[in-house]
Image: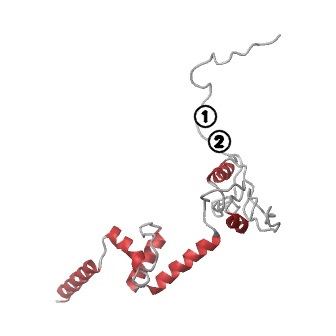
């Protein structure tokens, strides 16, 4: 005897609604020093198109992501240079042919930055810090330690060739600090210390 299934006659809310989102390793405690734990989070997804990035993030979210233990072989140059999981091409081949490292499709914009770009930006920032005035250098280091994104992303050198000035303009605008305000505060401190000593 066959039971006939009704197609679309049932209407209304679902029979069961989840109270909380599903966690892939809910029953297993993850060691914070493992890759993917709090102390060693997964590396940023780079060199792929937006669609592939979303796929990799989904795999990470739902426990389907398996990080590489050793570099994989690139499908273009056949060298063991693929350092990120779920990638088919190494960064150099993907950049050279301007294609996605996962799906090998020609894409206009690729998500993420290469390690060499990050290192070059870090060197440029260190040079700006070296060439800046002491006051600006300390202000910049304080804001970097706080993690506030109040510094503009302009180049560290302006048209006059003075390094460090352009990167601090955004900070002065946001905080309202200027040299005039600091001199007034210094004069007020000196005046108050003179009153105390009398």
Q: Position of residue 182 (x, y in %)?
A: 28, 80
Which mark, residue 30?
A: none
Is residue 139 positioned above or below 60 on the image? below
Looking at the picture, the colour scheme in use is secondary structure
Locate residue 71 relative to residue 178 in the image: left or right: right
Viewer-proximal residue among 86 and 162: 162
Identify residue for label 2: 22
Q: Quadrant of the N terminus?
A: top right
Q: Are marks 1 and 2 in contact (CB under 8 Å)?
A: yes
Q: Position of residue 35 (x, y in %)?
A: 70, 61
Identify residue for label 1: 18
Question: What residue appears at the point 65 percent right and 41 percent down from the top-left corner?
Answer: 22
Question: What residue appears at the point 47 percent right and 82 percent down from the top-left corner?
Answer: 129
Q: Residues within 10 Å of mark 1 (few under 14, many from 20)?
A: few
Q: Give SS at disc 2.
A: loop
Is residue 27 positioned above or below 145 on the image? above
Viewer-proximal residue among 159 and 144: 159
Q: Quadrant of the C terminus?
A: bottom left
Please give the count of numbered marks on the rendered protein. 2
Q: Mark 1 to mark 2: distance in Å? A: 9 Å
Q: Quadrant of residue 118?
A: bottom right
Q: Position of residue 41 (x, y in %)?
A: 64, 61
Is residue 178 positioned above or below 87 on the image? below
Q: Quadrant of residue 31?
A: bottom right
Locate residue 20 relative to residue 105 in the image: left or right: left
């Amino acid at each position: 005897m066959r039971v006939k299934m009704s197609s679309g006659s049932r209407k209304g809310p679902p029979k069961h609604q989840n109270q909380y989102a599903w966690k892939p390793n809910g029953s297993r405690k993850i060691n914070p020093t493992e890759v993917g734990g709090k102390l060693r989070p997964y590396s940023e997804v780079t060199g792929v198109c937006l669609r592939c990035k979303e796929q990799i993030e989904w795999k990470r979210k739902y426990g389907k992501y398996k990080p590489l233990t050793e570099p994989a072989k690139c499908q273009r140059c056949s060298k063991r240079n693929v350092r990120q999981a779920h990638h088919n091409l190494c960064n150099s081949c993907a950049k050279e042919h301007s294609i996605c490292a996962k799906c090998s499709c020609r894409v206009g914009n690729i998500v993420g930055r290469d390690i060499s770009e990050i290192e070059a930006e870090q060197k440029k920032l260190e040079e700006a810090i070296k060439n800046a005035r002491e006051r600006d250098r300390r202000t910049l280091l304080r804001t970097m330690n706080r993690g506030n994104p109040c510094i503009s992303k302009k180049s560290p050198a302006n048209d006059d060739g003075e390094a460090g000035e352009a990167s601090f303009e955004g900070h002065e605008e946001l905080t309202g600090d200027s040299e005039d305000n600091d001199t007034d505060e210094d004069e007020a401190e000196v005046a108050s210390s003179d009153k105390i000593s009398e």
